[in-house]
Structure formats: structure tokens, C-alpha cells
Amino acid sequence: MSRKKKRGWQKRENNGMFNKEKTAEGGSAVKQMADKGILLVFGIFLAAMRGGELLPVVAMLIGVVAAALGMYLTDPREKALVFCTFFLLCFLLPELCFFLPAVFYDCAAERFYWGAAGVWPFLLLLYRGEAGEPWQAVLWVLVSVTALLLAARTGRNARLEGELIRLRDTSTELNMALKEKNRNLLEKQDNEIYLATLKERNRIAREIHDNVGHMLSRSILQMGALLVSHREEPLHGQLSSVNDTLGQAMTSIRESVHDLHDDSVDLRLSVGEILKPMRQKYTVQLDYDMTKAVPRAVKYCFLGAVKEAMSNVIKHSDATRIEITLREHPVFYQLKIRDNGTGNQRKAQSEKPEGIGLLNMRNRVEALGGTFRVTEENGFQIFISIKKKETEV
């Protein structure tokens, strides 16, 4: 998975978690609105039973505003100021006492234990005999207790929903981390298998070269000596035929050994070996993004270019930083080598436009049908692009 896709996937996951939290908060707000709506309905009912036209309406509007502010405000100090103001208004407008349960609901939700003092306006109203019938006072008490129970229930449900969301998010994060770890382990395992395969190919190539190749070489030399000492026919012709067969076998083995050795060359590891001594003196940044199926000719072309470029940096550059980019695109391979040298990059070379090293690089790239370009703006840069063959695209 590429870095861009990975970031997009993680962004979508984070957005999903955020949406879940918003949904949970929205559900809790709906429950609070439903609870307060019930309490306000009881308050309107009790205020209407008290009689009058204007004062119950004013009390209802103030009660609705106080209940709405209790949900809208987020600062506890602002909420406390609203509730205290409402309690004081209850002494001036007795009808507000019937809407106290809605305020008690918010006080219980915010754990404002001092909100219990809000019962004093209603006790004063009860003492004056202005609270209505006894059943109305009992109903007010029941509604107030119900408000506290509703606040406790809604708060507990909100906490449980929040805990559920946290557990779900934690589980999702752990699953994502586990998937990422498994992917890294699989990549590491594949890379180890690939390196082991390359080492085995290299070992087989050495074995064939050191054993079979030497034995064939010795046989060819011996056959040549027999051809010189036995010129009579038909023995000479037969020995000559055997010698040709041995020569063909030697050529076939040599080609097989070269193919095995070339296939065992890992471009990334080889470039890393070239850059290893450079890291002692320079800041080296390698950006490698190529598949393993890079043609042999492109491998050796890029390796030769990196070696020559590093040699030029050591000999002719005052650079302190080197950036190397190897990237495979859908239709071409690309190599870019850049350093931050500020002096004359070829001051020790001849006055020719390109030295021997750069000329050899250009010839090697153009032999593969590629593009070679050198620029000296803001440092020294070598750019190589080799088009893929139709069979590789």
C-alpha cells in the first residue's frame, strides 16, 4: 500500500470515528431535549392551574429560555449564573417555581449540588398558601424527583455510550495496528525470501563457474592437445567434433552463469553498498521506488552512473548533501542524482563540455535508448530516463 493511499485510508477511519462521536453526542442531546420537554409540559400544566393569563405565559417563556440555555452553554460558570438568576426570579414571579424541575434537571446533570437551594422559592410559595391544591404540591415534588432520576439516567446512558465509543475506537486502532504489523511482517518475510533466493543463485553461479567451468576448460585444453598430436583421419575429425561440442557447452555454461549472477544482483542493495562509505562524510538521502523486475542492462547502467557520480562528488565537488532518486514509472525508469555543491563541479577536469566519466554515462544511457541530462543550477544534477520495452509495459 502506497503512503498516499495509506494516509487516505487512515483519514477516512479518523473521520468515521469523529462522525460516531458526533452521532453519540447528538443522540444524548435529543434525549435531554425529550426529558426537558416532559418537565416543561408539567410546568405549563401547573402554571395554568394557578390561573391568570399573562404571568403563566411569561413564566413559561422564561422557563423555556432557561432550559435552552442549560443545553446551549458549555461553560459551567455561565450555566451557574443562569440558574442562580432563575432561582432569584422565582421569588419575584412565583409562577416560575413550577418550572424549577427543568432547572433541577440541569443542576443534577452538571452536579451542581447547591442547586437544591432552588427549592426555597417553592417552599415560600407553599408557606404562603399560593402553591395551589395539595395534590399540585405533591405533583411538583414528584416531578422534581423525576427530573433528578431522568438526569441520572440520561447521564449514565451518555457515559455508557461514550465508553462504548472509546472501546470501539480502541478496538479499531488495535486492529489497524495489527494489520499494519502483519503487513510489515509479510513484507519483511518476502524480502528475506527474495534475498535468500538471490544469494542461492549467486552461490550456484559460483559453483558452476568454479567446478564445471574449470573442468570443461581443462577438457577443452586436453582436447586441443589431442587434436595437435593426432592428425590422422578419421580420428582427427572425431576429436574436432568433440572439441566443438565442448566449446558449445562452455559457451552455454558461461551464459547461464552470467544470467544467474546478473539475476542475483539487487539494485537497491548494490546502490546501498555504493553509498555506505559516502555516508561517513556526506548527508545522503536515497529515495527508492522500483520493482524487483528491473532489466539487467538498466541495473548496470544505473549502478555505473551512481558509482561515477559518487566519484565525481569526491573529486570535484564541495557538496555536503547528496540526493539520489530511483523511480519506476509505468513506461520508463528514472534516476536522478543531485548534490548541493556550490563551486565549479568540473574544475579538475578538462575544458571539454563533459569529462570521460559523464561521457561514458551518456553513451551507456543512449545505447539503451534513454535520455541523459546534466544541469548545474542550485547544485549539480544528473538526470537519466530509460524507456521500458514494449514487453515490460
Image: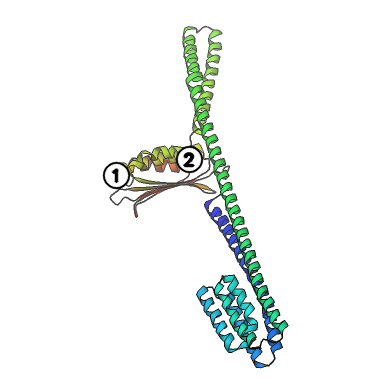
Q: Which residue is identified by label 2?
A: 298
Side (left or right) of 360 relative to 96 = left
- Mark 2 or 1 closer to N-term? 2
Q: How is the image coloured?
A: rainbow
Q: Quadrant of the C terminus?
A: top right
10 Å crowding of disc 1: few (<14), some (14-19), many (20+): some
Residue 132, quarter of picture: bottom right
Please tell me the numbered disc located at residue 24: none
Q: Is residue 355 shown to the viewer in this render?
A: no
Q: Residue furthest left?
A: 348
Percent position of residue 345, x then y:
30, 48
Q: Residue at x 56, y 79 (%)?
A: 83
Q: Secondary structure at mark 1?
A: helix
**Frontmost residue, 183 versus 260:** 183
Total label count?
A: 2
Percent position of residue 105, x then y:
62, 74
**Amino acid found under the numbered disc labelled 1:** His
Q: Is residue 100 shown to the viewer in this render?
A: yes
Q: Residue at x 55, y 41 (%)?
A: 185
10 Å crowding of disc 2: few (<14), some (14-19), many (20+): many
Q: Which residue is identified by label 1?
A: 316
Side (left or right) of 282 relative to 182 = left
**Amino acid found under the numbered disc labelled 2:** Val
Percent position of residue 300, x then y:
45, 37
Q: Residue at x 57, y 53 (%)?
A: 173
Q: Residue at x 63, y 61 (%)?
A: 160
**Frontmost residue, 266 versus 348:** 266
